[in-house]
Image: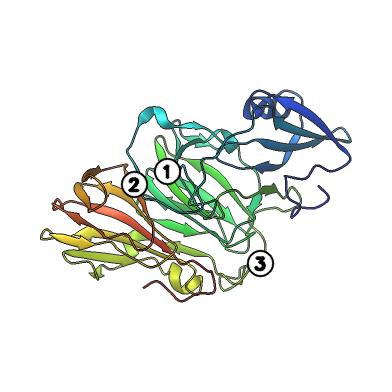
Amino acid sequence: MTDSHTSANHADSADILIPCQDVSAAAEFYTDELGFRIESVFPADAPRIVILSGYDLRLRLESIDPLVRHETTTPSLVITNFNQSGFGTGRAGMQYRDLIPDRFGGRFIASHIRISDGGPVPDYVHHHDVQFQMIFCVNGWVSVVYEDQGEPMLMEAGDCFLQPPHIRHRVLECSDQMEVVEIASPAEHETSADHGMELPTSILDRERDFGGQKFVFHKASQTAWSPSFLKGFELQDTGISNATDGVASVLIMKSTGNASDAVLSHDAGIRFLFVLGGEAVFACKSENHRVLRKGDSCAIPPGLACSLVDVSPDFRMLDVSIPSHPEGRSVR
């Protein structure tokens, strides 16, 4: 790798290849015990390749057990129920739970990420080679600082960030039992360190364009609820559709107490729901009905006839839609 945009899939001729059973554990040893620093990670949720530098050396830690992704070219319905044992170790010691195991043919990834013990997070300034990426806070709080966006920002439960392509950022600290949901496209993308940048930067440019997108910090406490297109729901619009020029729509939905049959069918690339509270029944002609509760999620392919029924009065969900093509119209 000769620069931050070179794919981690291609080893630089100067890299020393070190096969590993556990790449994350090996990276922790080389950084904490030997003083190396991370240059890039691929992918972040379950690292298979980590590039390190130090002592005029570049090391390439690579898994000797290739991770098999059960990817399909034809997207199918994916319902994931919450499971405490479903978390694995990812980048910077964070725990990841995979919410779309089949990756919708490699196009999307959704992760439930948590940190059990609060305090400083062992992160570094980094950026992601993505077309779309958002972070939604499910529980607790987390402090993050972003390139050209001012002082560190405190994201609390109900808030979310849009992280435009290659915006530099760093996670600073978090509360106990911090949980977020992260959604990105494509599914596998490189995370690269930028050790030369200090955050916060001296520049404040809230309107800066990053790859055709603008940074968004949605504060739930400062956003009004409005009527929803889903019967029996109201919504908060995060503004991400406007900031991405229709690449994605991110809404927070809550029941008004009289939701009966909320149609979820769509013609976007994917519609992803994550349950924040209450319960509802996911009804689909081609599948058995499934009860969705807090922590459950579903990834819905286009053209599938489905809906939410028997919605509890306290039901809340994150509702994300991403079109087939970034330049396409807004799905709303």
What label does residue 99 carry, if any?
A: 1
Across and down, in percent, residue 46 comes to 57, 36
Q: Residues within 10 Å of mark 3 (few under 14, many from 20)?
A: few
The residue furthest left is 258
In the image, what residue type sits under mark 1? Leu
Q: Secondary structure at mark 3?
A: loop
Reading the chain from its start, which is encountered first: label 1 or label 2?
A: 1
Would residue 314 appear left or right of 304 to someone viewing this image?
left
What residue does disc 3 label? 203
* Residue type of the residue flagged with mark 2: Ser
Please name the residue shown 52% across and 54% down the image: 184
> Which of the two discs, 1 and 3, sits closer to the camera?
1
Of callouts 1 and 3, which one flags the residue occurring earlier in the amino acid sequence?
1
Q: How far across and how far down the image is residue 33, in percent? A: 72, 23
Q: Residue shown at 87%/32% (left/top)? A: 55
- Residue contact between numbered discs 1 and 2, judged by CB atoms under 8 Å: yes
Which amino acid type corresponds to the residue marked 3 in the rendered image?
Answer: Ile
- Is 242 on the left-hand or right-hand side of 211? left
Q: Quadrant of the C terminus?
A: bottom left
